[in-house]
Amino acid sequence: MAKCRDKIFGELTEMDIRDTGLSPSKAELFCKNLIRIVQSTQGSVNLWIKISQALLTPAHPFALHRLLYHTTYKNWNSELLGPPPAWTPALEDAKLTNIGRILVARGAELLASYKDPIASFNDFYQLSVEKPEVYWDIVLKELGLKFHERPSCILKSDETNFLGEPCPGGRWLPGAILNVAECCLQLDSEERGREIAVMWRNEGQDDSPISCLTMAELRERVCRVANALEGAGFRKGDAIAINMPMDVHAVIIYLAVILAGCAVVSIADSFAPSEIASRLKISKAEGIFTQDVILRGQRTHPLYNRVVEANGPRAIVLPARDDGIQVVLREGDMTWDKFLELTSTVDRPDDFNAVAMNIDDTSNILFSSGTTGDPKAIPWTHATPIKAAADAWAHHDIRHRDVVAWPTNLGWMMGPWLIYAALLNRASIALYNGAPLGYGFAKFVQDAKVTMLGLVPSIAKAWRNTQVVHGCDWFHLRCFSSSGEASNVDDYLWLMSQAKYKPIIEYCGGTEIGGGFVTGSMLQPQTLSAFSTPAMGCKIVILDDRGQPLPSDLPATGECALDPSIFGSSTRLLNASHYNVYYKGMPQVQGKVGVETSSML
């Protein structure tokens, strides 16, 4: 490759390319194309854009991808410039993002010195923290929420006490009356009713058509379950647990519980009886939806029996198989079919008037992991889901008619997050009923034409080790997202290589805030296993050893704290002092006590 003008690529030989796994003839052709790109491109970033987009494909050996990535950035000054970008937004694409649309239309009005969506992104982020009333007014309009009574303002910052405890972040949307499940189910046109709300496929049925529910069908089924809840005697404010795999039934039940004015108690289907029992006790659950067994390939695992061992409240039990319940029920428990029969006397069982709720009412009770003691019981209000959907709108760029997949469970915050991120942004939820580690899931992502795929890093590592995604076409993906664990640079370079280098939006936050506080953006270059921005509306402060804030415009190492004014964040715990857990002992920053992020872990 002596013809390469670039010295670094001039050191590569055709044999280096062949050593990655290409045949001699393919290596020769590849080198010719690489030379042409190198000779016509200035700068490492532009060179990697062309190599990754115009030359490399998922069919090429990953060793070749890795060789060219590291060769391109061999002289990159990471100390001065930070880690090198694996993906860089194009301006025309940036203008089509959710934030890009807003800035194209209103950038000159909103920002003092607007240039374009990429150049002005940081200014828009600053607006989100300095002028929350402006930013959140934009988001609420974008999400099209249905208010029974509109709030008196966006943020009442001088109201710093809630239910007898200090509330340093103020009150969001005071006076608002709505039902967030009703907002998810709005049918404002016949066309909206025909759009796909949920799609799914069962493990082992890789070649079968994908099953779908339209928005109209989803709403009908949710309303039927809400009517059955009333028929079963549940009332506004009751806590009702869900302990089952996250399938279409779980989504329906979740929305129905909230639509009926009750609060979902989220319990992961992997929990032992003692863990189920502690969460039921803390939440004072009046009922529980569960499944007879869990199917994993050819194996079955007990689930209902764990609920019984936990001395759970009256249970509604769904069958894992089509041929009916596989267990004997306790007295007072009922099958799913019997439960739905409770609507037989309702005039319009497929319709239900949503129970109007105060914005501060509980919609969902979630829990910390509880690895060091009793889990913290964290109530989500009817505002918290808006934060989840807003993050998805701003950072994951979820748009109308997108398809969103994220292997998870309602027992963890990413389960409810997935529901709101998709439905409040008028996108579709994609669910795979089985383990996400095999070819079946990878093919489902292809067949469902998923546009945003979320995962934990261990899934990507497993895919890379087994090569199960080989041959799958993930062309429709616009981005990945990663949360829950620390990611690996090499694994994530491999993951990007499987989808023609679509970006990975790292996403770190907590159940307490219903989303992220540090993440990435489709309007910024994305580096591997790194964040590029605080989340919209979240102000991060780095504290030194003395608890003093370090300058925000310089690189710094220290403890991460948050400004407490985060939309939708928790204001209470069911089993502990919220203030003592998150604020006590934290220093004042610009007149407000900071949030201790380590308490979210």
Image (tube, grey):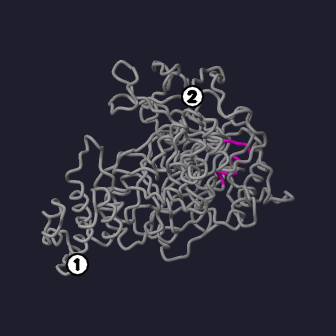
| Mark 1 residue type | Leu
Residue 254 on the magenta span? yes
Q: Is residue 291 above or below residue 241?
A: below
Question: Percent x, y for residue 450?
Answer: 50, 64
Which of pointers 1 and 2 indicates the residue nearer the eye? 1
Q: Is residue 493 left or right of residue 409?
A: left
Disc assigned to residue 474 = none
Q: Which residues are magenta?
A: 253-263
Secondary-structure class at tag 1: helix
Q: Nearer the viewer, residue 363 or 341?
A: 363
Marks 1 and 2, Cα distance to the nearest angstrom? 66 Å
Q: Residues within 10 Å of mark 1 (few under 14, many from 20)?
A: few
Question: Percent x, y for residue 344?
Answer: 82, 60
- Which quadrant holds residue 287? top right
Q: Residue at x 24, y 70 (%)?
A: 34
Disc assigned to residue 575 = 2
Question: Percent x, y for residue 505?
Answer: 43, 51
